[in-house]
Image (spheres, grey):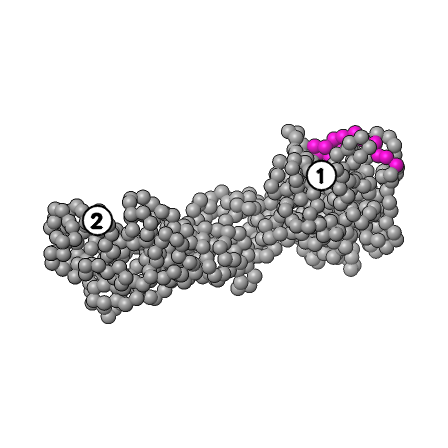
Amino acid sequence: MACAKSHNVKRWTICAVVCLFALFTMMRPAFAEDGAEVYFPVYDVENLRDALPCLIGAIGEDDRVALMTSGVRNKKQLWAVEGAWNAQGAIDVPSANSVWQLQIHEDGTYSILTSEGKYLNTADGAALSLDTKSKSRWNIAPSDMGFVISAVATPDRSLGLYAWQKELFFANYKHSANATPTLQIFVPKTALPGAEIVWPEPDSEVLLSVGELSASVASEGLSVVAAAGCRLSDGSMIVPQGASTFVCRYVGDSVFVLQNDEGYFSHSLAYAETPEYWSVDAVGLKACDATGVEISEPYLVYNKTISEFCLIPASEVWRASYVPAVLSGCAPEATEELSEEGVKTLRGGWSTEALSAVSWQGVSALDLRALALPIATQSFAHRPAQCNSPILVNAEASMHLVKDWPFVLQCDGEDAQLLSPFTLSDGVPLKWGGRFKAPRGTLSYSRQMYADGGWETLCVPFATMVPDGFEVRVPGEISENEITFLKVERLEANQAAIVRYVGAVETGSALLHLNNDAETVQPASSDFLLRGLYDTLRVEGNESGIYLLNTSGQAFVRAASGSWVAPFRAWLCPGQDADVQTAYALRLPEDETSGCAMPVCDANRWQGACYDLQGRCVLLHTDAVSFAALPAGVYIVNGKMIIKQ
């Protein structure tokens, strides 16, 4: 068998690492004791579970297996040991230090640990190290021959096997122009999907599949149909064009036939007029008789070398060129529905391509909670660059997201959690009003403001501290023609306010950046004097009850028809009982000077002409003395509105 000792030079092919080496006597395989756990090769990331023990290795052209151990070579590589195939097509554990454990993080990356709990980390160049703290996250991606295991920090390198004279070891090798180092992962039989025996549902529609391939049955036999992007996270598949589907009809507890209008799927991999029987186990789909007894060559596999399906004996299943076929449920038809509130809900089976092409026109939130995502998701082709519409997913789907999906909320019943940091875009509507949680500092809002000391309105859906360099005030009392605004250091969620930059007074801009200071977030309008909003407000006709902050930022004036307020800002509502006023001045108690409701800045502010609201020039050159002599009223100086009492 391939696990026998050899002193001959063998050629191993592990994608980019193709090397000649001699396996020396000390690397003879060590077989597990009776009853010990055995490990089977897997080909899909769906078989990699959190806290799962596993073996990591490489399969050579002669089917010999070299497994990575936690033994350190020269302080920068890890020793390899030869694994032993058994009659089940599995690997017996050769040593305790060849067993690793995977930890899966929320972002889909992995930590790789030894059986002693040390983390596998990268070092300089191709070097590896084992540490008590996790310093490296890993991506594990399926390939034609196994998995590519790359550190997030070094995506141009992957774990690979190398031979130096008579020594075998693993390191973090750089990709070549022609290939990428590829390894095999082996998991315990009890961790395989078949160990749970998830049988096809009675009378359900199924298709034959291998990874992103499916099968078509014709008179000449079984042919391959490409199904890229069709496998979904729940194990079902979207039926690709040309693929054959069957109804699974049970004739016993563990035996079934596969039937469609053409006939019965037979052991000759074609249609037959009479029933022929099938079953499933930890490996995959297998042919049997009506009582469940396997035939001599029971397992249906895909031979990657010749790109064909075939039946093989159990002793051959472990070979690297074979991938066991499985039965996949057929996903329901893809549907979408857009509610009056703009929530677009997707249901059924959406392929990678179809999901990435979904339209975002008029969408306030994309609800994917009823959806099994495709295993390989892509960016949304039509999502605007600035968009405040969240993507709602279930817990299972969150494991299959691409990193550039922004504003993703993982939902569990009525609870929702922000999965990764997100910054709300200023001036872009946030129409979805659902409640969710965001760890402190992970949800933010930014606005580019004028740095001239003028006031602007503000409303954000989370509590936040006022950053340095800015002043925030909230409304207090309202009198006949003015409103008192009180200074605050912390703004509550959905609390409308006015804000200004208090640094330099010269023309320029300043970035206002706010971070959430509490976990609970829920965008909501208020019925207060100053009302914040997250959608655009457009004034139609003569709205006497709406007052907007004027361009100078010094008074709220009656809204004219056609005016509008951008999202994350606020408008003034004095109430039905208030007398109709042309304007309400801002009264800032600690800044009152000379009977004027605006702060008196340096002498440069008191220059230039002064105009009344009719546009007439009342002072050619304005200073504090001449301004004090003017009658009470509203004036414009240097583009700023000043209310004199």
Q: Residue 83, how many percent across, how many down?
A: 82, 43
Q: Is residue 610 left or right of residue 37?
A: left
Vertical position of residue 337 compared to residue 78: above or below: below
Q: Which residues are magenta?
A: 13-25
In the rendered image, is residue 209 in sight?
no
The prevailing secondary structure element of the residues shown in magenta is strand
Q: Residue 559, how many percent across, how many down?
A: 24, 57
Q: Which residue is drawn at the image coordinates 77% and 40% (left, top)?
A: 79
Vertical position of residue 130 compared to residue 515: above or below: above
State which mark lies toward you, 1 or 2.
Answer: 2
Q: Which mark is residue 258?
A: none
- On-image quarter of the C terminus: bottom left
Residue under numbered circle 1: 76
In-front residue for pair 278/60: 60
Q: Residue 8, how many percent across, how many down?
A: 86, 30
Q: Which amino acid type is shown beneath numbered disc 2?
A: Ala
Q: Residue furthest bottom?
A: 577
Question: Which image quarter: residue 142?
Answer: top right
Measure the alpha-carbon separation of dots 1 and 2: 68 Å
Residue under numbered circle 2: 603
In-front residue for pair 354/140: 140
Q: Is residue 392 left or right of residue 164?
A: left
Q: Residues within 10 Å of mark 2 (few under 14, many from 20)?
A: few
Q: Which amino acid type is shown beneath numbered disc 1?
A: Lys
Magenta span contains residue 23: yes
At mark 1, the secondary structure is loop
At mark 2, the secondary structure is helix
Q: Is residue 129 left or right of residue 318?
A: left
Q: Which residue is drawn at the image coordinates 68% and 50% (left, top)?
A: 132
